[in-house]
Image (cartoon, rainbow, N blue to C red):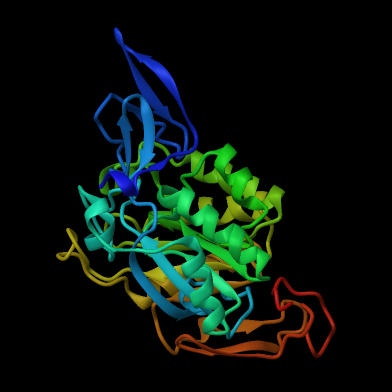
Amino acid sequence: MTERLHKALFWHKEALGKVVGIRCELCARRCLIPAGQRGFCAVRENQGNKLFSLNYGRVVALNTDPIEKKPLFHFYPDSFALSYACAGCNFACAYCCNWEISHVKLPEKLGTNYSPQQIVDMAEEQGLKIISHTYTEPTIFFEFAFDVAKLAHKKGMKNTFVTNGYITEQPLKKISKFLDAATVDFKGSGDEKFMREFASVPSTDPIFQALKLMKKLGIHVEITDLIVPKVGDDEKKFKELAKWVVDNLGSEVPFHVLRFFPSYKMMGFPDTPVKTLEKFAEEAKKLGMKYVYVGNVPGHDYENTYCPSCNTLLIKRSGFNAISNVEKGKCPKCGAKVNIVTD
């Protein structure tokens, strides 16, 4: 175990009663960690009043995925990304579909050791131009993700995060020069009552702060919102989220309204009705959003991308397959600029 310890970033010593502890500054929880203990994520431990990452390079999932699976619909459509994760998470979602690798007490016991160079070499060998830090929460394996992302950029590759957005300002700024795109996942439209009860998240404010910073830093952002029947499907909360996105990030941010399927501790809940997703998508469009999608409903017309100016079909999708007509970020018919990264 000792040889796998990796000194963590973003922390300082702080008084904990009559003794000294460690204040972790990586995510918005800002855990105060006594000696010998771990933070909420279970991957950062105070050893001798120094903070260590226990999951550095311990890769628990490694696949080649279509970029549409992230989902990133406006970032190099119809391309593939080497996708990987290390164990752990800073949320405790009762509906987590990756709970076997996210909700673990000893994340350092899972996975296989990889170096950042091995991850980048693997992507290069497969001819991939994108690496996606995904599946769990990339914030909590920040040190490894940063090292991978930096090496990837040297090879001309792009990096994406699939994240809950619960990252603080300093680490986000640090990785921003190597982070090209992020999918930020909301659940239940970011309703704080829902998030406290079903994800153990005390406040959603840090997510909104991170999103505004991502925009300022020039990171391509797409947003998902998991609509959970009965407890996370409040139409008013959904409209509030959609309006916030339009007002603060702009009308061209791709917005994915996702269908919930029973998982983990919420097996007794039903699937989200497709009609609910369609209604919410229409409401988002009424609020000014130009690119709205319905997710987890294969074959739905809301998978496709149309030009906001002339309604020309720009990207035809079927599941995770995509056929794009976009060149240099412009509609091929009317020439209007569209928020789609292609080069």
Work out which residue is located at the far left of the displayed protein and give it: 268
Residue 19, horizontal then vertical, whole percent: 30, 12
x and y percentages locating residue 328 in the rendered image: 79, 80
Placement of 327 over or under 72, stated as above or below:
below
Q: Nearer the viewer, residue 46 or 189?
A: 46
Residue pictured at 68% horizontal, 53% vertical: 177
Query: In the figure, is residue 73 to the left or right of 9?
Result: right
Q: Is residue 267 above or below residue 47?
A: below
Farthest right residue?
A: 335
**For residue 293, side relative to residue 87 (left or right):** right
Which residue: 19% across, 62% down?
264
Residue that appears at 38% across and 33% down:
51
Where is residue 49? Give x, y as percent: 35, 24
Q: Position of residue 90 (x, y in %)?
A: 35, 46
Q: Quadrant of residue 326?
A: bottom right
Q: Describe residue 313's horizontal placement relative to residue 170 as left or right.
A: right
State the count of labels.
0
Q: Residue at the location (49% across, 72% down)?
A: 71
Q: Nearer the viewer, residue 228 or 120?
A: 120
**Quadrant location of residue 45?**
top left
Q: Where 3 falls versus 118 (above or below)?
A: above
What residue occupies the far top of the structure in this picture? 18
In this view of the protein, can residue 143 be seen by the observer?
yes
Name the residue nearer the viewer: 292 or 211.
211
Of residues 134 and 5, which is closer to you in this image?
A: 5
Visible residue check, residue 237: no
> Quarter holding the C terminus?
bottom right
Left or right, 156 with respect to 38, comes to: right
Where, by quadrant of the figure, is residue 29 drawn? top left
